[in-house]
Amino acid sequence: MVDSGPVTLGKRKCRLLVTHDDYSMVSKLPKQSMSVVTILRDPVDRVFSTYEFSIKVAARFLVHPNLTSATQMAKRLRAKTTGVSTLDIWPWKYLVPWMREDLFARRDTRKHRGLNDIMSSDPYDTPEIAMPLHVYIHDPIAHDIVHNGATFQV
């Protein structure tokens, strides 16, 4: 494929919004001349992605241990930007605090046992560090939010 330079749109005031938000975002957009495109993800890929993102965002609390809640983290992030914090958005406002509590409990258990270096060939099964994927998938919180949430978002 040859790059032909910048794309010129046929309409001068054409704008594009790309978001992971659910369809309720449409109610916040101007009604005139709007088109919506929805992309549905593979459900298995979506579960992996949700698991990984939950850990990634929750792990930020390990770097900032003085922040004791998702609410404090959201306020701190909001103060630095004009946007909305991930921690204000469904499903993250539920999944991140849940994962945060789990990460802190596992960290405290490692410290108590004197474990520092943990090596694993399977990043989805490191119970000393993070909730294993199979535990995450079968937990009622993940079931309600992740499994049923995909249907809710559509």
Image: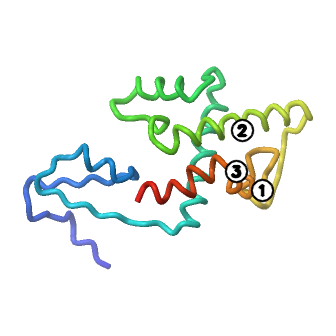
Could you tell me which secondary element the residue under label 3 belongs to?
loop
Contact between marks 3 and 1 (CB within 8 A): the answer is: no
On screen, residue 6 versus residue 13, left or right, reads right
Task: Please name the residue shown 61% across and 35% down the image.
Answer: 97
The scheme the figure's colours follow is rainbow
Q: Earlier in the sequence, mark 3 or mark 1?
A: 1
Could you tell me which secondary element the residue under label 1 belongs to?
loop
Marks 2/3: CA–CA distance: 15 Å
Marks 3/1: CA–CA distance: 15 Å
Give the image quarter of residue 58. Answer: top right
Mark 1 Cα shell of 10 Å, populated few (<14), some (14-19), many (≥20):
some
Q: Earlier in the sequence, mark 2 or mark 3?
A: 2
Q: Earlier in the sequence, mark 2 or mark 1?
A: 2
Note whether 7 is above or below 110 in the view shown: below
The residue identified by callout 2 is 103
How far from the left and from the top, in percent, is residue 123?
Answer: 73, 57
The residue identified by callout 1 is 125
The residue identified by callout 3 is 139
Mark 2 Cα shell of 10 Å, populated few (<14), some (14-19), many (≥20):
many
Q: Amino acid at mark 1?
A: Asp
